[in-house]
Image: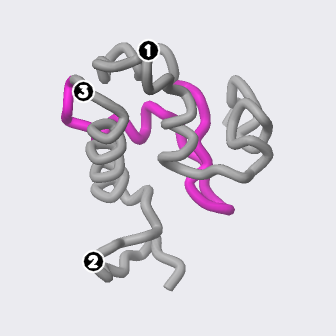
Amino acid sequence: MDWPHDPDGEEGSEGGRKYGLAILAKKLDEEEDFPLSRDEFVEAHADEPVRINYRKVVSVDDIFDHVDQAEFDDIVDFHQSVGEAMRRGGFWDYHPKGEVSENSHI
């Protein structure tokens, strides 16, 4: 896919050092951006790449297809909602309750 910027560059994942939810969170200013509208966030970043793991890159829009919440009160609310959506959508390799999925490296 043709991305608007390199998923592994400084604008994407800071040279491959950040993955998944960390990439989404770095697009936000905790002091200025909340409350945050889901739709406004997606409109601003929909086609941007998010590296999920060493093999997989998806768009912000792909992830937010699984986010039901319309507004986030703060960064913690954002992390919780988007993290849960990433698990539901199969974008999360780590499962804190010990669940192993086909996406897991276990």
Specify the segment rendered in magenta. 46-70
Disc 3 designates what residue?
73
Label 1 sits on what residue type? Answer: Glu
In the displayed structure image, the side of residue 25 where residue 77 appears, left or right: left
Specify few, some or many for label 3: CA neighbours under 10 Å numbering under 14, 14-19, or 20 or more. Answer: few
Residue drawn where x is 28% and y is 19% of the image: 35
Residue 52: numbered disc? none
Tell me the colour scheme of the image.
Answer: one colour
Disc 1 designates what residue?
32
Disc 2 designates what residue?
97
Q: Position of residue 96 (x, y in %)?
A: 33, 73
Q: Check disc 3 and report its element: helix, strand or loop.
A: loop
Distance from the alpha carbon under mark 1 to that under mark 2: 33 Å
Furthest toward the left, the residue is 69
Q: Position of residue 79 (x, y in %)?
A: 36, 44
Check residue 57 for magenta coloring. Answer: yes
Distance from the alpha carbon under mark 2 to that under mark 3: 26 Å
Q: Quadrant of residue 34?
A: top left
Label 1 vs label 2, nearer the camera: 1
Furthest toward the front, the residue is 31
Dot 2 or dot 3: first in sequence order is: 3
Q: Quadrant of residue 48?
A: top right
In the displayed structure image, the side of residue 84 where residue 11 appears, left or right: right
Q: Check disc 1 and report its element: helix, strand or loop.
A: loop
Q: Quadrant of residue 58?
A: top right
Q: Is residue 82 above or below residue 90?
A: above
Label 3 sits on what residue type? Answer: Asp
Q: Nearer the viewer, residue 60 or 94?
A: 94
